[in-house]
Amino acid sequence: MYSFILLSCIYFSPVQGNTTGIYQTKNDFLTGNLTYHRSRLRTKSNPFLLRFPLSFDSDESLYLPQPDKSEKKIEPASSFGFVAKGITFIYNSDEKKYLSVLHDRLPVYFFLKEKVTYAGKVRRIIDILLYTQDLDAPTKEFTTENIEHDFADKKALFDKLLKLREAIRKKQFRTGVGREVFFEYQKLIKNMLN
């Protein structure tokens, strides 16, 4: 039997208009096929206050309540990702954590992760934008250098990505991306890539 401290437990449950569920495989993610979509999911993660459900601060398992009041533990490696309160997460084995998904289709998949930096005793959280063109390939940070390296031969996409990078910089999305801003960030990427 597990013993949990209430303050460190986060519950995901369907809220009017929001989706909750698990993507068992990459194909499930690509096709939008969720399992356990009517169940609550829980993690023992201790995410940064007021920022959840955007990022996790550690490698965490999901817990799926069962009818007999027990819980089924779902290890990160045993499922591709999940959706909680309308935000999709996929497990990134290189980062060893769940990353929130900002753009879930080609030509480029975008993800958000937290990076904590310290200046003396002051802790600062920076949101890092990662991307990949292949969900089986490692992610890269969305920098001008990486854009030039990966997209120089695709002129139209190259230009869109440089404009997107500039728009992100102007909106200052790299710091303090809360839930409301997350959806604005997502909308900006979608609009600029279409």
Image (cartoon, rainbow, N blue to C red):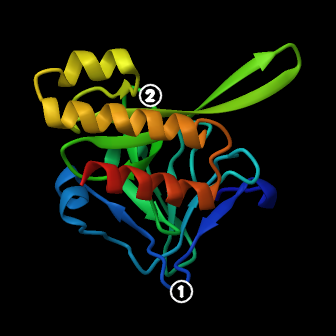
What percent of the width, then of the height, locates residue 53? 59, 56
Residue at point 46%, 42% (across, down): 99
Q: Is residue 72 left or right of residue 138?
A: right
Q: Which residue is mark 2?
A: 95
What percent of the width, then of the height, locates residue 111? 41, 41
Where the C terminus falls, by quadrant?
bottom left
Q: Is residue 61 left or right of residue 154?
A: right
Where 184 falls versus 41 (above or below)?
Answer: above
Type of amino acid at the residue the image marks with label 1: Gln
Where 66 falls versus 192 (above or below)?
Answer: below
Residue at point 36%, 42% (across, down): 110
User: Is disc 2 placed on a helix, strand or loop?
Assistant: loop
Distance between the Cα atoms at labels 2 and 1?
32 Å
Q: Is residue 2 left or right of residue 101?
A: right
What percent of the width, then of the height, locates residue 70? 55, 70
Where the N terminus falls, by quadrant?
bottom right
**Residue farthest along the right direction in this orientation:** 121
Number of numbered discs: 2
Residue at point 37%, 73% (across, down): 36
User: Is disc 1 placed on a helix, strand or loop?
Assistant: loop
Where 87 falls versus 154 (above or below)?
Answer: below
Which is nearer the eye, 169 or 73? 169
Numbered tag placed on residue 174 in the rendering: none
What percent of the width, then of the height, locates residue 57? 62, 38
Tell me the quarter of the picture where residue 115 sits.
Answer: top right
Q: Which residue is mark 1?
A: 16
Type of amino acid at the residue the image marks with label 2: Glu
